[in-house]
Amino acid sequence: MAKDELMNYEQALAQFEVVIGLEVHVELNTKTKMFCGCRNEFGNEPNTNVCPICIGLPGSLPAVNKRAVESSIAIGLALGCQIAPTGRFARKNYFYPDLAKNFQTSQYDEPIAFEGALEVEVPSGNKFNVLIERAHMEEDAGKLTHIGGATGRIQGAEYSLVDYNRAGVPLVEIVTKPVLGAGAEAPELAAAYVRSIRDIVKAMNVSDARMERGNVRCDANVSLRPIGSEKLGTRTETKNVNSLRSIERAVRYEIQRQAAILAKGGTITQETRHWHEDRGATSSGRPKSDADDYRYFPEPDLVPVQPSAEWIESIRATLPENPAERRKRLAAEWGFSELEFRDVVNAGLLDQIEETVAAGAKPQAARKWWGGELARVANAEDKDASQLNITPAQVAELAELVESGKINDRLAREVLTFVLAGEGSPAEVVAARGLEVVSDDGALIAAIDEALAAQPDVLDAIREGRMQAAGAVIGAVMKAMKGSADAARVRELLIQKANS
Ligand SMILES: [Zn+2]
């Protein structure tokens, strides 16, 4: 495949304004599908969760899943949208082997939710208000697996398999208005926006929100226009990007690719594109015009959805705290510096720290352990901090052991390794392995005497006020006691001895 020419990123930004638009599909975690009673479950034997309705056999009649409507309204409300008092489903007609019905039941000109906004913070701390145009309900298609090709795509495949278990799974598609003004941060903003959506639907428990399973996936529209120009440029739509990192990379790639073409006087083809994680590039999909004709028409087999104001309000009352509001509240409660707080947000540690503080730890201690040693271990094992074999309550217990002087930082790190290895809670590990700090004066004085025997000049030095000389003895004692001595106490005892 011919390699695209790319313009240097900074150079592209100096010449062009970036406009992005994001379409996020959220798969709902309802028990059953959108229009039938088939189970909505991931990973079952292919074509076992199917029935005449979801594979569109003649004469079958769909019925709307109330829970799916409820979840869709909840998502709309969480994004600050208005909820339509009445809305019809529509048929979007097209043929593809993963769509046995030959049409997708969707919403067209009457989405259930519209006109919302979401405040999104990018890693630099800059905040953007992303305007939401609409959120509508639709059903997912089946899943095709192409066999025999090198890339897993249909091109070059010998044959394809289809699994209709996913056909009819409820989806909410959330569409932004064009997002301008992010400049060089447009790729980060795209990823941060999708992360926000994922966090919201996860906190609301309306979706499993696992991007690696396609529960949340993003189509990223990118266009450029010369700086100062009013007219929007031609856009491309990179389809089904399903990791945050890939979204950021795909948007950045499209900016650099389009800039190189435009700078040479070329034109951008309006088309869908595919993202290739392996080579970090997009490739051309199919041309897409604004006039694609899907022969939308109102679905005659379904009654309009008309949620009452009472129902909408009762759903609103169940919404969890808005993530942006929650961040504001926690930042004030914890008293972290702006930088400390941003690091915690970017590392995805809010939940862990909140629970650790709730279990009795001081916020700074919770931050220190989760953001330090535990983040390091999680990174090394390529896990989320939440997947580590330690609970927030155990981290709080560890912090308390340090706070009370039972163990020092060095011992605490050792204790952590044993907790992570499944040896029990921090207190249990300390007891079982005898890891407590030694503050028994008798043992410390014996160790000090031994160290002084090797360095007899130290006492004189201390008497003369040269305190740095004490360091060598304290170090020797710590070493002799394998780090379990209380260094502050050793220092006190040494000074007492010099002055006695
Ligand atoms: Zn079915």
Image (tube, rainbow, N blue to C red):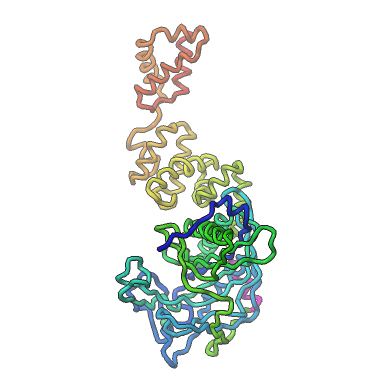
Q: Nearer the viewer, residue 100 or 412?
A: 100
- Name the main secondary structure of what is drawn in magenta: helix
Say which quarter of the image contains residue 45.
bottom left
Instruction: Decide if residue 323 is in sight here.
Output: yes
Which percent across, then down, holds residue 86? Answer: 63, 81
Kindly identify the residue that appears in the image at 44 percent across and 52 percent down. Answer: 386
Position of 46 with respect to 32 (left or right) is: left
**Is residue 193 or residue 491 the one in the foreground?**
193
Place residue 193 in its image quadrant. bottom right
* Left or right position of 293 against 116: left
Q: Ligand 1 appears in which quadrant? A: bottom left
In the rendered structure, the answer to whether residue 254 lies left or right of residue 98 reads right
Q: Where is residue 248 in the image (x, y as percent from the top left)?
A: 51, 57
In the image, farthest residue toward the front: 264
Q: Residue 206's x, y, as percent? A: 51, 68
Q: Does the magenta stretch include residue 316?
A: yes
Check if residue 454 falls in the magenta segment: no
Q: Which residue is drawn at 61% across and 81% down?
A: 87
- At horizontal 47% and vertical 89% (from top left) the residue drawn is 61
Q: Is residue 437 above or below residue 34?
A: above
Quadrant including the N terminus: bottom left
Check the image and report above or below for 285 versus 396: below
**Magenta-highlighted residues:** 308-318
What is the tally of numbered marks visible in this picture? 0
Q: Is residue 37 above or below residue 456?
A: below
The percent position of residue 196, horizontal first and vertical second, equals 55, 59
- Give 424 or 44, whichever is nearer the viewer: 44
